[in-house]
Amino acid sequence: MTANPQTNVSETTTVRRAVITMWLVLIGAAATLIPAPAHGVPVHAAAPGAGTVRLGSVMEWGCSYFAAGKDATGREVVITAGHCAPRRLGAAAYFDNARGGHLVAQHYVPGGLDYAAIRLDRGSRVLPPLPVAHPPRPGATVCKLGRMTGRTCGTVTRVGADTFTVAGMRMLLGDSGSPALNAAGHVVGLVSSGDHQALGAGAEMKFLGAMTGVSAPVPVIFARTDKVARELHATIGLRQ
């Protein structure tokens, strides 16, 4: 007995509508909890990945970030995921609800490099940057530091030209941009997304369940920070 193509299309559409509805509910609930923007110089996260950055609007859900060094102007730079930012250089950056910088570089390729660089305003304070290292090898353990789930660890399963994938690591919405650290405490990657292709049938619902903490973790794709640092050195003069 073969499946009815029209039925499959209908079921797929229903699932997608359910996913979209759940996303809207989550975003709407989050928006009601975000206060009006504060003014003044922010004190940035006490630990890498622990703070929240919102680009373009304080009504965004927000992502994690970490210190990267200084650019050619001598100003401090922090990095988050590129998909967290609008495609508009100069967009304002809000750190834990206080404006503290603006977007100076962005690169986002789904399943590939995914980063955004933010130049901090004068007087803003940030932790010293952690050293950047080459990507880990398959089988190695890495741990990420995110604003939603804190420190969680997993095992590297694949290493590519621009990314690597980690299995068994808990991650939630808002952890994008979190730094991944190797055993020496060096930054090797930043959280980009869940690996949708590894989920098989029902990928959308599995992904949503994992991102909201109601089902098992999905494999996580990290952008390689050695590649990110190299590109940012060429574009904004980034140095540690």
Image (cartoon, rainbow, N blue to C red):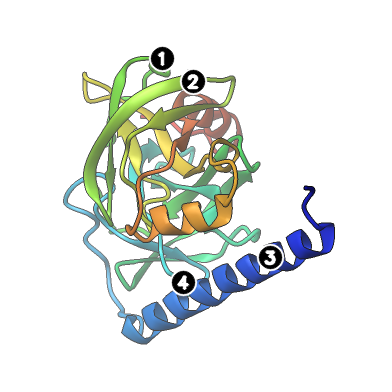
Which mark is first along the chain, 4 or 1? 4
Per the image, the residue denoted by label 2 is 158
- Residue located at (74% from left, 59% from top): 8
Cα distance, mark 2 to mark 1?
6 Å
Q: Are marks 1 and 3 in contact (CB under 8 Å)?
A: no
Which mark is first along the chain, 4 or 2? 4
Which mark is first along the chain, 3 or 1? 3
**The disc label shown at residue 35, or none:** none
Q: Categorize mark 2 by other alpha carbons within 10 Å: few (<14), some (14-19), many (20+).
A: some
- Residue located at (49% from left, 20% from top): 158
Front of the two marks 3 and 4 = 3
Residue farthest to the front, as pictured: 1
Q: Amino acid at mark 2?
A: Arg
Left or right: 32 with respect to 158? Answer: left
Front of the two marks 3 and 2 = 3
Cα distance, mark 1 to mark 3?
37 Å
Q: Nearer the viewer, residue 218 or 55?
A: 218
* Residue 218 in which image quadrant: top left
Cα distance, mark 1 to mark 4?
35 Å
Per the image, the residue denoted by label 1 is 138
Q: Are marks 2 and 1 in contact (CB under 8 Å)?
A: yes
Q: What kind of element bears circle 3?
A: helix
Q: Amino acid at mark 4?
A: Glu
Q: Position of residue 148 (x, y in %)?
A: 28, 57
Compared with 160, 204 (above or below) is below
Q: What kind of element bears circle 1?
A: loop
- Residue located at (46% from left, 39% from top): 71
Per the image, the residue denoted by label 3 is 11
Q: Position of residue 51 (x, y in %)?
A: 27, 57
Front of the two marks 1 and 3 = 3
Per the image, the residue denoted by label 4 is 60
